[in-house]
């Protein structure tokens, strides 16, 4: 059939790249562990968007199925990560990642 | 064939719903009388004077419930594509789904056994 | 028409992503992230991935962000208690993020501009995704259940600890 969308694939790539870089920037900038988690979610979503764009471009549904798995991974990551965060808050009374530096080389 | 154009009615409905809410809020803001006194602005607490911050940290049990909700929510999204293809997938699909659900039920029994969803004992 | 929607959604996504990083109040960050997720769901609808768009809203905006809000309120972080980083650390963070963006944008900008052709507009429907998921991706599907199981057990192990004693 070949429905031509007016948007070039490049633009999807650019949007995803910009979102991903904002996520990286957030991880580097902020010290609040919750915000860092949120930035990681943002990066995962940038990848998801790219995956769906490519899947639409190639006419192959595998990319969209893969997004499901990324969602499952994100949910698992958030569940365990936020539990760790709550433990961290209970023990140190802060969510500042700079506080946990005992493992630092 | 479905194209993004077929979502325009949904978009219109969304716009109408949002527009109604926003218009009502703005209209009441302008139309309603405003007589602010100190007593009126006080947070109401059964007539006695309110004390402390409203944002007290609450039990971790709410959080556990929310976590379990997220995990089972993700489980359910895998079930929609299965349910739509139930006939076409046949026995193989059924067995695959049984394994999937079985593993998650294992986790569910663990949750019950640990008493993560128990609400009564407050310690 | 589609272009304008695309550019509007991209603008919204990027702007609210920036607000996630730069807003002081963590609760505002969460709300802006929800906005970003809605913009991305709009992108999915444009790409004919309808099922994924709905699932994205249900899982991310409906479940994961609610969990974030719960944690924020549980830890009572709505007061701004985040210690500020030193200025040079901030500068280095922005610089490295910006350089990464510059590199990637420059790389893909030079790539050949091909219009996105949707050969098969039906790939996003639920039935088609299910066929792929349960035939080609059966093993990852089962493994993801193990992942969810371990996440469940891990989360309970971690956060149930204090109620024991």
Image (cartoon, coloured by chain):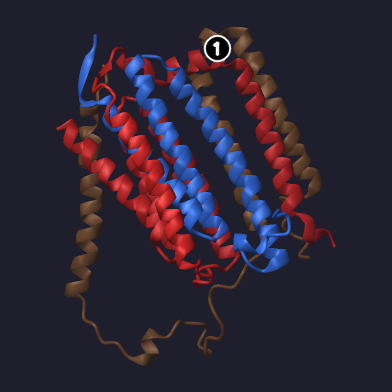
Chain colours: A blue, B brown, C red
Q: Relative to residue A68, is residue C31 depicted above or below?
A: below
- The image shows residue C141 at horizontal and vertical percentages of 60, 22
- The image shows residue C10 at horizontal and vertical percentages of 28, 41
Q: Relative to residue B64, is residue C100 depicted above or below?
A: above
Name which residue lies at 57% across and 34% down: A72
Of the pair B52 and C84, the residue shown nearer to us: C84
Of the pair A77 and C156, the residue shown nearer to us: A77
> The N terminus of chain B appears in which quarter of the rendering?
top left
Q: Is residue A105 left or right of residue C119?
A: right
Which residue, given by chain and number where applicable, does mark 1 sit on? C136
Q: Is residue B15 left or right of residue C35?
A: left
Is the residue marked by circle 1 packed among few (<14), some (14-19), or many (20+) residues within 10 Å?
A: few
Of the pair C122 and A101, the residue shown nearer to us: A101
> Residue B61's image quarter?
bottom right
Mark 1 secondary-structure assignment: loop
- Toward the left, the furthest residue is C1
Name which residue lies at 42% across and 86% down: B42
Q: What is the chain letter for disc 1?
A: C
Query: How many numbered marks does the figure carry?
Result: 1
- The image shows residue A80 at horizontal and vertical percentages of 66, 46
- The image shows residue C88 at horizontal and vertical percentages of 46, 63
Q: Relative to residue B64, is residue C149 depicted above or below?
A: above
Residue B8 at least partly seen = yes
Name which residue lies at 73% across and 36% down: B107
> Residue A61's image quarter?
top left
> The C terminus of chain B appears in which quarter of the rendering?
bottom right
């Amino acid at each position: 059939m070949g429905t031509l969308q007016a948007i070039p694939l490049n633009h999807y790539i650019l949007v995803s790249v910009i979102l991903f870089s904002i996520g990286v920037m957030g991880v580097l900038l902020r010290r609040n562990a919750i915000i860092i988690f949120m930035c990681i979610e943002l990066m995962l979503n940038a990848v998801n968007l790219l995956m769906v764009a490519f899947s639409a471009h190639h006419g192959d549904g595998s990319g969209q199925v893969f997004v499901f798995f990324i969602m499952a991974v994100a949910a698992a990551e958030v569940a365990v990560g936020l539990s760790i965060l709550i433990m961290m808050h209970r023990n140190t009374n802060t969510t500042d990642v700079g506080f946990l530096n005992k493992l630092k080389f | 064939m479905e194209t993004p154009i077929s979502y325009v009615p949904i978009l219109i409905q969304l716009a109408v719903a949002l527009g109604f809410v926003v218009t009502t809020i703005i209209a009441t803001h302008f139309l309603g009388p405003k007589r602010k006194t100190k007593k009126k602005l006080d947070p109401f607490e059964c007539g006695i004077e309110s004390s402390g911050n409203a944002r007290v940290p609450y039990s971790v049990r709410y959080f556990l419930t929310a976590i379990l909700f997220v995990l089972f929510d993700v489980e359910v999204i895998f079930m929609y594509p299965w349910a739509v293809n139930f006939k076409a997938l046949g026995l193989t699909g059924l067995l695959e789904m049984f394994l999937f659900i079985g593993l998650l039920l294992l986790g569910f029994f663990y949750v019950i056994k640990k008493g993560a969803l128990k609400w009564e004992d407050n310690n | 028409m589609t272009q304008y929607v695309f550019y509007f959604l991209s603008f919204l996504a990027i702007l609210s992503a920036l607000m996630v990083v730069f807003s002081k109040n963590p609760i505002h960050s969460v709300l802006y992230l929800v906005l970003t997720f809605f913009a991305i769901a709009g992108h999915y609808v444009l790409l004919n991935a309808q099922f994924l768009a709905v699932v994205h809203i249900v899982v991310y905006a409906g479940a994961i962000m609610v969990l974030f809000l719960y944690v924020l309120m549980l830890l009572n972080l709505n007061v701004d208690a985040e210690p500020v980083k030193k200025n040079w650390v901030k500068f280095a963070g922005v610089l490295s993020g910006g350089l990464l963006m510059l590199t990637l944008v420059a790389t893909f900008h030079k790539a050949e501009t091909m219009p996105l052709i949707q050969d098969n507009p039906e790939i996003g429907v639920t039935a088609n995704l299910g066929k792929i998921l349960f035939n080609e991706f059966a093993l990852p599907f089962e493994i993801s259940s193990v992942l969810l199981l371990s996440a469940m057990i891990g989360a309970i192990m971690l956060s149930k600890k204090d109620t024991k004693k």
